[in-house]
Amino acid sequence: MSQPRDLLPELALWADHQPITVEAWLAQIARSDEAMGFCAVLWPAFETVGDMVFRAPFDHQRMSGWSRLLHSRRDIEHALNQFDLTAFFTAGPEPVPIARERRLALARTMVEMLELKLARDLPDRQFTVALIDVGAATGVTFYQT
């Protein structure tokens, strides 16, 4: 599996083609509001609704629609906790293979982060965290097991 650094060809093209560290690169281009937004996405808060667990803030209206279609707690949590990363990779001029590889790398990292966060925040519950890679959509979801 590629390391995040391997998926950043920009690092080799910086400052007269001199290599640059990830930290130095981010210090030049990153914005604190974007960083905080990614923190909220990658390290989410959770909300318990009855015996179910969801990413916060939870949309109760959305649940009423899904609970009519799906009947098990597992299926409802699986559907409502899906987080699609594809939207984060459609604004730039990235070549499709690089965008897909970056989405998969981020999704794999998100799986690990969610496993740790769920175990820390809800130690009395067991979860499955799954990577979703279907067609052009890449993301993660979780549900209680």
Image (tube, rainbow, N blue to C red):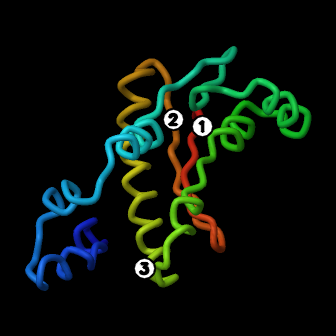
Q: Residue under label 3, please give it.
A: 98
Q: Nearer the viewer, mark 3 or mark 1?
A: 3
Q: In screen coordinates, is 131 left or right of 11?
A: right
Q: Nearer the viewer, mark 3 or mark 2?
A: 3
Label 2 CA crowd tier, 10 Å (few <14, some 14–19, many 20+): some
Outermost residue, right side: 68
Element type at mark 1: strand
Residue 111 in the image: above or below residue 49 = below
Mark 3 or mark 1: whose residue is earlier in sequence:
3
Kindly report the distance in space between the C-alpha atoms of the residues bearing marks 3 and 2.
31 Å
Callout 2 touching callout 1 (CB < 8 Å): yes
Kindly report the distance in space between the C-alpha atoms of the residues bearing marks 2 and 1.
5 Å
Q: Amino acid at mark 3?
A: Ile
Image location of residue 117, percent across then percent down: 39, 32
Mark linked to residue 36: none
Q: How many numbered badges does the structure rendering display?
A: 3
Mark 2 or mark 1: whose residue is earlier in sequence:
2
Residue at 91% across, 33% down = 68
Image location of residue 37, percent across then percent down: 44, 41
Kindly report the distance in space between the C-alpha atoms of the residues bearing marks 3 and 1.
29 Å
Element type at mark 3: helix
The quarter holding residue 1 reads bottom left
Q: Amino acid at mark 2?
A: Phe
Q: Residue under label 1, please give it.
A: 143
Mark linked to residue 127: 2
Residue at 39% across, 29% down = 119
Mark 3 or mark 2: whose residue is earlier in sequence:
3
Question: Looking at the figure, which quarter contains the C terminus?
Answer: top right
Callout 3 touching callout 1 (CB < 8 Å): no
Residue nearest the viewer, comparing 128 with 22: 22
Label 1 CA crowd tier, 10 Å (few <14, some 14–19, many 20+): many
Q: Amino acid at mark 1?
A: Tyr
